[in-house]
Image (cartoon, rainbow, N blue to C red):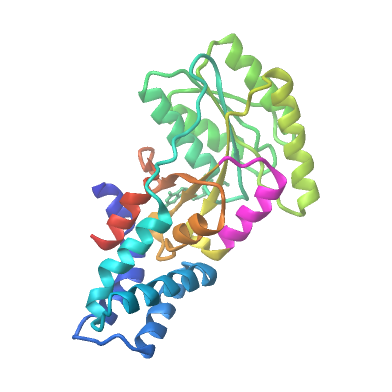
Amino acid sequence: FSKFKEGLTKTRDALMGKVESLISFGRKIDEEFYEELEEALIMADVGVNTVMGIMDDLRSAAKKQKLTEAEELKPVLKQILVELMGEDKAELSTNRDGLTVILFVGVNGVGKTTTIGKLANQFKAEGKKVILAAGDTFRAGAIEQLEVWGQRAGVDVIKQGAGSDPAAVIFDGIQAAKARKADVLLCDTAGRLQNKANLMDELNKIYRVIRREMPEAPHETLLVLDATTGQNALSQAKLFGEATGVTGLVLTKLDGTAKGGIVIAIRKELEVPVKMVGLGEKIDDLQPFDPKDFVDALFA
Ligand code: GDP
């Protein structure tokens, strides 16, 4: 929890710092107060729709409980966020008696390769045999970068040359994972997003290849989103959600941003759960996402 809390420092300062200063000095609840609070939440990338919902709940709770002091709203706000975020931790779905295939999707630069390296390291530490498939054959340097992570985590990387067919690389990855009796295959993909049709074609081909080899796979399709892009992350999630069967989100770079309020917007506006968060560039800077810890960290 302390690491999680530390990673959220900027978000907490942006979101709760403003809220704290609004609430202090014996301020009374009035229309001006509500407007400033609303603005503070929007500035922290909580998202307009989500903020409207929060403000409605806050106003009605204040009315019902006959609150007059701004200070009294703090626990009410916390409770609203706890309810909004839910308490359920989203675990990764894995195949208990055989190979687990996890596909990573997302636009360039969001942190796919880094996340794969971190997760490979975690699985390895649990005693699992891990293989990486270098399916991002498009971005210059992506294959080499995955190999560097493979070395760091001490796991094998299956690759072909730059520009080769990503579906073919992932096919090779599945064959190798089966032959070597691996527990987990983590598949990188290219994040080009010239247009949706293109993205769908490429990802559909990868799905077809995976399903032909293993009908129940992939066990997860994780969409990696960069928290520093704020509301942009939300639109990427909508786009990828339409193009692929995304089963979970990984929100990276939460450590470097004041826009962590996006986590709240994502929870409210998307059906897909945040499963992990990236809190730094190092190999152990990936944590499972616990919505309750998130709210506690904001109010800690
Ligand atoms: P990809 O193009 O999606 O594969 O993205 P990369 O994995 O290459 O990551 C892009 C940049 O983001 C790199 O410089 C990473 O070190 C950095 N990065 C990835 N995850 C995190 C994170 O959780 N926190 C921080 N601060 N940086 C990250």
Any part of residue 36 in sight = yes
Q: How many numbered marks appear?
A: 0
Left or right of residue 93: residue 205: right
Residue that appears at 38% across and 89% down: 31
Residue 62: say if magenta: no
Query: x, y (%) of residue 36?
Result: 38, 84
Residue 237: say if magenta: yes
Left or right of residue 202: residue 23: left
Up/down of 89 relative to 296, above or below: above
Quadrant in the rendering for residue 127: top left
Left or right of residue 37: residue 159: right
Up/down of 8 relative to 51, above or below: above
Residue that appears at 74% across and 21% down: 212
Residue that appears at 52% across and 21% down: 95
Left or right of residue 120: residue 210: right
Quadrant in the rendering for residue 19: bottom left
40 and 253: which is toward the camera: 40
Point out the image quarter for the C terminus.
bottom left
Residue that appears at 64% across and 19% down: 174
Any part of residue 165 in sight = no
| Secondary structure predominantly adopted by residues drawn in magenta | helix
Residue lying farthest left?
Answer: 26
Up/down of 90 relative to 15, above or below: above
205 and 270: which is toward the camera: 270
Query: x, y (%) of residue 79?
Result: 32, 61
Query: x, y (%) of residue 75?
Result: 26, 67
Up/down of 17 relative to 220, above or below: below
Query: x, y (%) of residue 27?
Result: 24, 86
Residue lying farthest front?
Answer: 64
Magenta range: 232-247
